[in-house]
Image (tube, grey):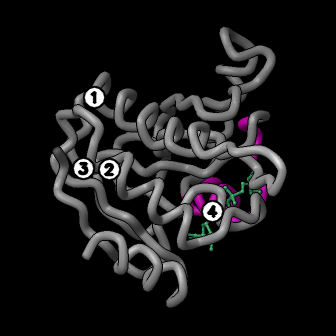
Amino acid sequence: MPTLTLVQGDITRESVDAIVNAANSSLLGGGGVDGAIHRRGGPAILAACRELRAGHLGKGLPTGRAVATTAGDLDARWVIHTVGPVHSTTEDRSDLLASCYRASLRVADELGARTVAFPAISTGVYHWPLDDAARIAVETVRTTDTSVTEARFVLFDDRAYAAFAQRVG
Ligand code: AR6
């Protein structure tokens, strides 16, 4: 089980083996943490994403899955892109959100990444309530069999930090 650590701040400033991106299925960029990662990481990340789209991910990356690229100019070896579910009040999509964390850890294991930074996936544009997202994130990372030694949650603001701090205990 990885050690869980919490940091408040900008995930693009972290030094880790892999930084997880809350992307969308197109893998071609967006706002929020995705925009920040592409801006600071530079064009190599987008070029790698375009190659994936030209290859086996021609239809894009499905929700709940994860794939790695170079981290470009970031202080990391890889960016692991995952696609969180849009929150729904009529359908329980918790499994898909949990799957983002599990799939990212699996990709990290395949790469040999030992330290991985996660944003609060789906809690921005995709509107997942913070407390529930924190519960799912922490429970899933705690119960996933992985060689990752540190899972670092990097929370952008006070509210997100408080929600995760409550779950990590
Ligand atoms: N570092 C850490 N966390 C951040 C940063 C940052 N630099 N910037 C924002 N956050 P979001 P989603 C937090 O919207 O909900 C994109 O357009 C933010 O406060 O980035 O999964 C993609 O292309 C929030 O808590 O991701 C998709 O279209 C969390 O990161 C869509 O948004 C996630 O917010 C994905 O939506």
- In the picture provided, is 38 more to the left or to the right than 78? right
Q: Please, what secondary structure does the residue beneath circle 3 have?
A: strand
Residue carrying label 4: 33
Q: Quadrant of the N terminus?
A: top left
Q: Is-magenta flag for residue 41?
A: no
The numbered disc on residue 109 is 1
Q: Position of residue 62 (x, y in %)?
A: 70, 27
Spatial CA span between label 3 and label 2: 4 Å
What residue lies at 47% left-to-right and 74% top-to-bottom?
Answer: 155
**Labelled pair 3, 2 in contact (Cβ < 8 Å):** yes
> 12 or 149, which is in the foreground?
149
Highlighted magenta segment, given as a residue range = 27-40
Write down which quadrant ligand 1 falls in.
Answer: bottom right
Q: Quadrant of residue 106?
A: top left
- Report the amino acid beneath label 3: Thr
Q: Position of residue 50 (x, y in %)?
A: 72, 27
Please report whichever mark, 2 or 4, sits nearer to the chain's N-terminal start.
4
**Labelled pair 1, 2 in contact (Cβ < 8 Å):** no
Residue 137 position (above or below residue 104) = below
Task: Work out which residue is located at the far top of the displayed protein and give it.
Answer: 56
Spatial CA span between label 4 and label 1: 23 Å
Q: Position of residue 52 (x, y in %)?
A: 65, 20
What residue lies at 50% left-to-right and 43% top-to-bottom?
Answer: 98
Spatial CA span between label 2 and label 4: 15 Å
Tally of marks:
4
Task: Work out which residue is located at the far bottom of the displayed protein and give it.
Answer: 158
